[in-house]
Structure formats: C-alpha cells, structure tokens
Image (cartoon, grey):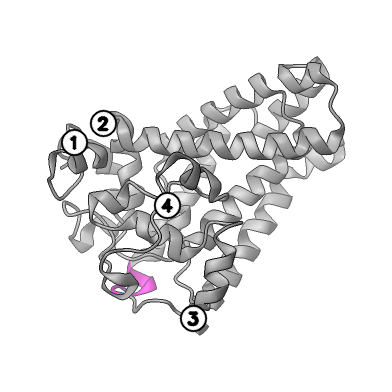
Amino acid sequence: MTDTVLAHEWAIRAVCFLGILVAMAVWEGMAPRRVRGFTRRARWPGNLGIVVLDTVAVRLVFPTTAVAFALEGERQGWGLLGRAGWPAWAALACSLAVLDLTIYLQHVMFHAVPLLWRLHRMHHADLDFDVTTGTRFHPGEIALSLIVKLAAIAALGAPALAVLIFEIVLNGTSMFNHGNVRLAPRADRWLRWLLVTPDMHRVHHSILPQETNSNFGFSLPWWDRLFGTYRGQPEAGHAGLTVGLPEFRAAKYLRLDWLLLQPFLGHARDTPLHARQSGTSGGSG
C-alpha cells in the first residue's frame, strides 16, 4: 500500500461505488425480483441524497479515513497483527474476516439497543427494497460505524490495503444484497454459502420482527449460520413479503427531510428484538 494509492482512495472508492450502483440498477430493470410499490422518482432522491449528506458529514467531522488511519497504524506497528509478523496474505485475509465479523456484531447491537435502533431504523423504513436501500443509512449511524471500524483497525493492526479492500467490498455487497434482482434458485442456493445474496438479505427487511432479527450479515453469510441468526426464506415468500416498518408506512417518510428526522420521532422503547420477545408486531414507534 503506497501513499500514491492512498492519495487516490476517494477516487477509487467513488468509481467502484458508481460502477456497482449503475450495474445493479440496470440489472434491476432487466430482471426484477419483485414488483416495485413505488417509483424510483419517489424513493431515489431521498435514498441517494442521504449518501451525499453522509459523505459530506464524514469529511467534515472526521480528520481521517479508515484507510489513512490503518496506514498510520502500519507505520506505528499498532495492534495484534502489527506485532505478530504474519505474512502479508495471512494478515490481509484475517483482517477482512475480522472486520466483517465486527460489522455483523455492530449490526446486531443496532437492533438490540433502543438508542442505536433509532438511528438504524431509517434503513429499515424504506418501503421498497432495491440497490439504493443499501446506501440508505442515517449520518449518525455512519459516524458510529466509522468509530467502531477505527477501534477494530487499531486493535487488530489491519493493513491499509485490507481496509481499502474491505471498504470497497462492504459498499459493493451492501448494494448487491439489497438489489431487487432475480437469481436462479440454484445459483442463489450455492452463492449464499459464500456471499450474502439479495434473497437472503431481503428477509432481514421484513415487517415481521422474527424475520427482521435474522440474516444480519452484509458480506459473508457465515456469521449468521455460526451464531444461529440465519433464516433461509420469509414465511410469506418473497412475492408476499412486506418490507419496512409498521410505523413508517406513509409516502412522506421517503423524503430526505423525514429520513433525517426519523431518529427523533416516536419512542425508542422497543427494538425488533424486544418486539419478538414480547410477541408484538413492530419495532419502535
């Protein structure tokens, strides 16, 4: 990992992001998995507008990126890997796996802690499920996620190259597994042993709490299987699955202003985990 590559980090990530976004949008148009309930014109300005705000907020609030932070860690010899002297390939593979596990655990916590759920529920309140749902995260959640990643990078001593690859893969797989795209059943069945597929992750966006609290993985599907949070298919099938949250069904909640306001609406007493335990049908209201 050189300073030259680091200097072009934003350009590399932007090209990858836009390339995957366009490719998934074309795929959705050619082979949709489900009939859209809302037009792209109704949903995409809010979903893509929040991406712009997230990017600006991170640049203004944080003096460093995760990749630059990792590069400084390499220079200083931070973390377990910095002291272990592992081969570069082993350090890279270990870092990718551990960082992905960190995001899985973080995702579970965002469902379990009421104040964190306030931020995360904006992602679940989308009334359709497509590639832009994978970009729809509140700036507060993005900021907390970056802090978690920086802590994991420092403790692990993850190489900067591994962090760059991880950031690109995380963004790319988030758009892929939120895609409204059709995969052949056999291809989906085999692929979900290696990668979280759209049919696997769509279950997580169900309005039913017991389905919302499953399939937390973004990239690797192994953590859900290992920790018992894997669910193969939705009860109503993918055609009959209702996505979103019961308390945010009005079309106005698709607008950018309402997306930003969602953490301040209602109460944060109930999370999806609490709803499942208590037998109720929704998340926080």
User: Which residue type carries mark 4?
Assistant: Arg
Q: Position of residue 268 (x, y in %)?
A: 20, 33
Q: Residues within 10 Å of mark 2 (few under 14, many from 20)?
A: many
Q: Give the magenta-colored segment's residue range.
A: 37-42
Q: Nearer the viewer, mark 4 or mark 1?
A: 1
Magenta span contains residue 235:
no
Above-or-below relation of 76 to 221: above
The span from disc 3 to disc 2 (Cα, nearest Å) is 37 Å
Nearest to the observer: residue 181 or residue 89: 89
Q: Which residue is mark 3?
A: 29
Mark 3 touches mark 1? (CB < 8 Å): no
Q: Which mark is residue 270?
A: 1
Depth check, mark 3 against mark 1: the one in front is 1
What residue lies at 87% left-to-right and 36% top-to-bottom?
2
* Residue type at tag 2: Pro
Disc 4 target residue? 136
| CA distance for labels 3 and 1 | 37 Å
Please tell me which residue lies in front, 274 or 1.
274
From the image, state whether disc 4 or disc 2 is nearer to you: 2
Residue 63 visible: no
Q: Are marks 1 and 2 in contact (CB under 8 Å)?
A: yes
Distance from Cα at disc 4 to Cα at disc 2: 19 Å
Read off the residue under disc 2: 114
